Image (tube, grey):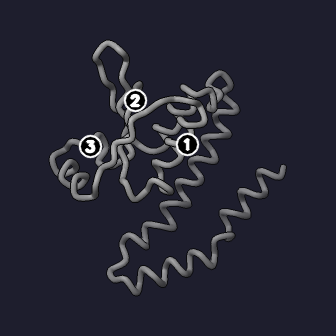
Amino acid sequence: KSLSIFYFPTHGKSGRGLAVRLALILGDIRFEDVLVTRAEHLEQKRNNQRRWGGVPEMDIYNGHGQTQTIAQSSTCLRYAGAITGLYPKQNALKCALIDEVMDSQEDYFVSCFKPIILATNEDERRKLVKELMNDAKGDNYGMMRYWFDK
């Protein structure tokens, strides 16, 4: 193995860790999938065992017994893209355009899901999810279509 990805088991089909996994799979890079339960994550976070306090994280092994940990979903995704050739690191403009999409999606993700995470009860959470689903093709979708169609 050349690297390990640390992420929640319930997010195997979605979430920030999925994009990293898919990039590695598309690039034919073998990796270890380390599934971290919420309880394990919270304990590790309390004990300052998470690089930036959250997952995904990636351990990169250099073959000489040394490991470098990187964190933050966009950072892990850019690294995966770089080692697979999916992120055109020799073309700064193409990289910037990819980064632009990634960063705008991060803004959208946070704006959508932060209220849901902070909801104080299940009824409020369900209402917010329903509103989000009804507006799934709102401003962000229109903006993306505009730029991709150009």
Residue picked out by circle 1? 22
Q: Is residue 132 left or right of residue 149?
A: left
Q: Are marks 3 and 2 in contact (CB under 8 Å)?
A: no
Q: Which residue type does callout 3 highlight? A: Arg
Residue displayed at 58% across by 47% down = 102
Identity of the amino acid at label 2?
A: Leu
Q: Is residue 148 left or right of residue 100?
A: right
- Cα separation, mark 2 vs mark 1, equals 14 Å
Comparing 82 with 3, the one in front is 3
Q: Indicate which disc, 3 or 1, sits on the residue closer to the N terminus.
A: 1
Q: Is residue 113 left or right of residue 94?
A: left
Query: The residue tagged with tag 3: helix, strand or loop?
Result: loop
Classify mark 3: residues with Cα within 10 Å, few (<14), some (14-19) or many (20+).
some
Residue found 40% across the figure and 26% down from its top: 1
Q: Residue at x 28, y 55 (%)?
A: 37
- Residue 54 x %, y %: 32, 49
- Could you tell me which secondary element the residue under label 1 belongs to? helix
In front of the other: 132 or 62: 62
Q: Position of residue 77 (x, y in %)?
A: 51, 39
Between discs 2 and 1, the one toward the N terminus: 2
Q: Amino acid at mark 1?
A: Leu
Q: In which quarter of the view is residue 144 placed?
A: bottom right
Lower position in the chain sequence, tag 3 or tag 2? 2
Tell me the element at label 2. strand
Q: Nearer the viewer, mark 3 or mark 2?
A: 2
Image point (64%, 40%), residue name: 98
Circle 3 or circle 1, nearest the eye: 1
Residue pointed to by mark 2: 3
Q: Mark 1: few, some, or many residues within 10 Å (few <14, many ≥20)?
A: some
Indicate the position of residue 94 as horizontal and vertical percent values.
69, 33
**Residue assigned mark 3:** 50
Callouts 2 and 1 close, C-beta under 8 Å: no
